Amino acid sequence: MIPGFAHRRRFDDLSEQEILALAISSEEDDGRIYRSYAEMLRDDFPGSAAVFDGMAQEEDEHRRRLIDLHSARFGDVIPLIRREHVSGFYARRPVWLVENLGLERIRDEAAQMERDAERFYRAAAARTTDAATRKLLGDLAMAEAGHQDKAGELEDKHLDAETRDSEESAAHRQFVLTWVQPGLAGLMDGSVSTLAPIFATAFATQDTWTTFLVGLAASVGAGISMGFTEAASDDGQISGRGSPIKRGFASGIMTTIGGLGHALPYLIADFWTATVVALIVVFIELWAIAWIQNKFMETPFVKAVFQVVLGGALVFAAGALIGSG
């Protein structure tokens, strides 16, 4: 049996029974994935959840037809063979990975699943000689290709224009609250708050390695502090801002990146070269913050630039004056 093999099997080496068994397990997996998507979306996006419920039912029907054919040809004992047992066979991303990427990303992932399944059934049909098996696999390939139309029918049934607009608006708002807002706060804190200690150290010592170490410590320390503060300050249950763990990671990582951006140039040995590069990086960081504020927070661009540049300039000036003194 396949699980006992030390290495994966090649698809071309599978028997027709094994191809059917692989198709059955794949349909089972896809049905579970669609149901997971549905449960994940049900509270916030009931219309989209209903679409995935319908797609899961389609996969169940495919599985039933495959099992009936296997029973007729090979009996009721189905070999245990799964995607991970076959070399080069397409894989599915873990549900926990996709669920963090938003509603539209989940829809895109489902569309890719159908394309993968269609290619598999066409390849499987080309490998079989039994007429009934070849016909079923060909029919399933056509069914998978037609799932885009089926998904469209389900969306027309469960997602009218108003519902779809409402869900997309809610998804965008959730993305902003869970990822963009804490990430932006972290980037601003990391980029601005570390200016003073880094440039104070730079002008006081004119030692690039010492400046880098101070910048590294300030960035990592600020990232840890911001991450824990964001995660502990709000569990998201009442505010609706989403998982505190996700927000904590977004805030902590972006805080660290914001500080490291102008600390890393001090790995350059020449002090003035490192300082000029660091200032260029600071300009890019502040511009990026203003762009994010404008794009996701709908802050007027000129206002965002003024706020960020003014704050950054004041902190930099404080650090430079203290370091020079």
Image: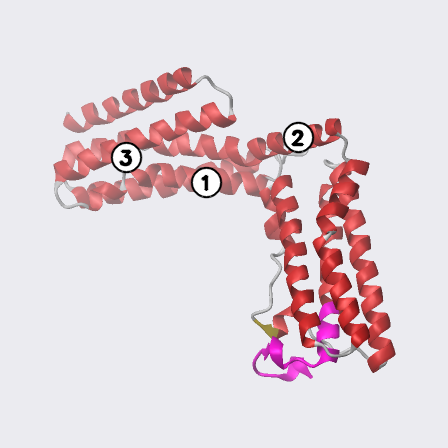
User: Is residue 288 shown in magenta?
Assistant: no
The residue labelled by disc 2 is 170
Mark before the other along the chain sequence, 3 or 2: 2
Q: Could you tell whether 288 is left or right of 279 in the image? A: right
CA gap between label 2 and label 1 equals 25 Å
- The residue that appears at 32% across and 41% down in the rendered structure is 260
Q: Earlier in the sequence, mark 2 or mark 1?
A: 2
Q: Secondary structure at mark 3?
A: helix
Q: From the viewer's side, name the closer residue of 184 and 196.
A: 184
Q: Indicate the amino acid at tag 3.
A: Val
Residue drawn at (39%, 41%), measured in percent from left and top?
256
Which mark sits nearer the N-terminus, 1 or 3? 1
| Residue 208: % across, % down | 17, 42
Magenta residues? 1-23
Q: Magenta span: helix, strand or loop, mainly?
A: helix
Rendered residue at 66%/30% (across/down): 170
Q: Which mark is residue 281?
A: 3
Viewer-nearest residue: 4 or 274: 4
Marks counted in the figure total 3
Q: Quadrant of the C terminus?
A: top left
**What residue is shown with label 1?**
252
Q: Quadrant of residue 15?
A: bottom right
The spot of residue 300 in percent (x, y) is 45, 17
- Name the element at disc 1: helix
Residue type, numbered disc 2: Ala
**Distance CA(mark 1)–CA(mark 3):** 20 Å
In the picture, which quadrant includes the N terminus?
bottom right
Q: Amino acid at mark 1?
A: Gly
